[in-house]
């Protein structure tokens, strides 16, 4: 099993850029998580997704369709404003 350095944290706001328009930024707030699942608020509704592990970070998708946003652990809203 690989060690993940960047983990998704509860209470943080994560962002993803639109696949069609780079200037369109989607944000979600993580409300809770387990080892394999994350719950987040997107567009006023709470949703849940499976956490996937990449080489050195965790990520999750906001849906199952092709254009759904992918959120990655080091991309919280504070890194966007820096």
Image: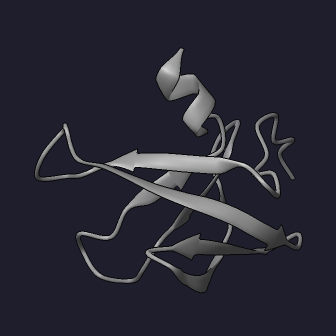
Q: Position of residue 60 (x, y in %)?
A: 57, 64
Q: Residue at x 51, y 53 (%)?
A: 71
Q: Quick one: which residue is furthest to the front in this view?
A: 44
Q: Quick one: which residue is furthest to the left in this view?
A: 20
Q: Is residue 75 visible?
A: no
- Residue placed most toward the observer, 20 or 46: 46
How are the residues colored? one colour
Judged left or right of residue 81, residue 5 is right
Q: Residue at x 63, y 60 (%)?
A: 29
Q: Quadrant of residue 43?
A: bottom left
- Residue placed most toward the observer, 33 or 57: 33
Asked if 32 appears above or below 47 in the picture, the reply is: above
Q: Position of residue 75 (x, y in %)?
A: 56, 36
Q: Residue at x 70, y 63 (%)?
A: 30
- Residue placed most toward the observer, 55 or 32: 32
Q: Residue at x 57, y 24 (%)?
A: 79
């Amino acid at each position: 099993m690989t060690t993940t350095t960047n983990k998704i944290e509860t209470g943080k706001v994560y962002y993803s850029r639109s696949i069609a328009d780079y200037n369109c930024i989607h944000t979600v707030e993580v409300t809770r998580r387990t080892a394999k699942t994350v719950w987040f608020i997107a567009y006023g509704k709470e949703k849940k997704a499976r956490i996937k592990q990449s080489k050195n970070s965790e990520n999750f998708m906001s849906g199952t369709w092709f254009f759904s946003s992918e959120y990655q652990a080091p991309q919280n809203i504070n890194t966007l404003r820096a």
